[in-house]
Amino acid sequence: MHLGSARTALYNYLLARRTGGQFILRIEDTDRKRFVPGAEEELIDGMHWLGIQWDEGPDVGGPYGPYRQSERKEIYLEYAHRLVEMGHAYPCFCSRERLNRLRQEQQRQKRPPRYDGLCRRLDPDEAARRVAAGEPHVIRFKTPKEGTTTVHDLLRGEIVVRNETLDDYILVKSDGWALYHLAAMVDDHLMKITHVIRGSEWLPTFPLHALIIRAFGWEEPTWVHLSVFLKPSGKGKMSKRDAAQAIKDGRSIFVTDLRDLGYIPEGVLNWVVLMGWGVAEDDVLTLDEMVERFDVRHLSPSPAAINFSKLDHFNGKHIRRLSVDELATRVKPFFERAGYVVDDDVLRKITPLIQERIVTLEDAVDMAGFFFRDEVTPSPEELVPKGLDAAQALDIARRSYNVLASLPEITAEAAEPPMRALVEEMGLKARQVFGVLRVAVTGQRVSPPLFESMEVVGREKVLERVRNAMAMLEKMAS
């Protein structure tokens, strides 16, 4: 499930909730060659993770089921035969070889590839006899060849196409499976769909879909074709190659990946909803707030560049909005995945220390993993602050140790005043003295607040880690 699918689902959901309608999850799986085992489960898991709930669907049922198109094969065949009987469709018996030769010849002549209508000209009675005899065939839509077809998109207005440019598209393949073109139109009618919000990739066949509905004499839904996603540079559509590069950079356009990378659903939704929606780009919105403000007429057809910095921005904002207990619950699996045995009491204490500093849940592991280690092994070079040498760093470590060892307990309240006094006494900068102590205790240059961190680590471990740092600095100084 990629960002395009997530945004399409989200907009449909927001419209349904805003207007008191029903949001339908329909699995369009009639293309059996592209069927991927587990894809439906991943889609449903991704939607649940995002917090998008549907009123009708394959897992919850509803009055217009079944909601998997693969379970509605006979329904589509019935409507395809109706189109044939009404003269709006016809059986086509052309072999794959003939169609390939036709396409090659059209390419040679630099003409757009299109069916030449050979079987369209067959006598209907002859075609019916060949079908009855079991001759393999597909069913094609008999597209009008003269005049124009006008369709209306809510965002783009009227779109007019010359009928001579349209193909006689296949509606039902020779194996009896209907294509999306027929299946979705039939389902929209039978399920009483009033609004279809979908990706812009359907714009080229939009006239066909309208013609199918008109052939049956049905009422058309309101059509909304969303903007395309551009790669982060803004130049060109996001491709599979771009997606692969994003993964290498710790980014992704796939919902499951974003979850595993430590993004939270609130942040992802806030990011996605604004890509194509004409509201302020920095608005931090909950799902309920999106519902309150949503107006389908404010969507934009203009292409939207994928901006991962915005994702980080919104994810961080929503992490700050979580309660401490909720954030602790969400970061715990990331610590465990990294191999840490997590003490819930310790986790509860460190969560407020990292909440303002992390962008993703995964960041918590890098920033606060040291709390769950028995010992840390700092890089010797990092123990020496900029502008000082190993001997000076060793002096800082020794005097810091003496200050801390003199305290009956190491709390932020008890440790900070005497350590700041030591800074004054030594005539150094706080970042130099505290830098040595930070690397010694946490093993890293960037950490949660130093004195609060030492309080959580505990007096004995703090002193032990400073002693280890002193030993490292002694070797460097000698």
Image (tube, rainbow, N blue to C red):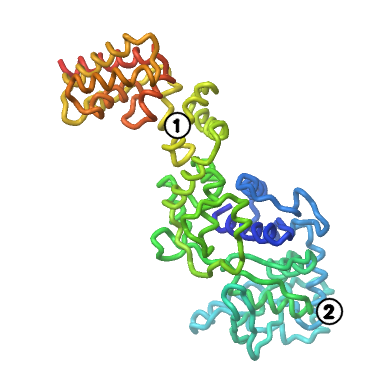
Amino acid type at circle 1 is Val
Q: Nearer the viewer, residue 405 or 359?
A: 405
Question: To which residue does mark 2 refer?
Answer: 129
* Residue at the image position 82 percent from the left and 76 percent from the top: 82
To which quarter of the image does residue 391 belong?
Answer: top left
Amino acid type at circle 2 is Arg
Could you say where residue 355 lies in the image, as x and y percent from the top left? 46, 35
Label 2 element class: helix
Q: Is residue 97 above or below residue 258?
A: below
* Residue at the image position 51 percent from the left and 60 percent from the top: 275
434 left or right of 238? left
* Residue at the image position 41 percent from the left and 46 percent from the top: 248
Q: How many marks?
A: 2
Q: Nearer the viewer, residue 16 or 46?
A: 16
Question: To which residue does mark 1 refer?
Answer: 365
407 left or right of 228? left
To which quarter of the image does residue 428 belong?
Answer: top left
435 left or right of 330? left
* Tag shown at residue 110: none
Circle 2 residues within 10 Å: few <14, some 14–19, many ≥20 = few
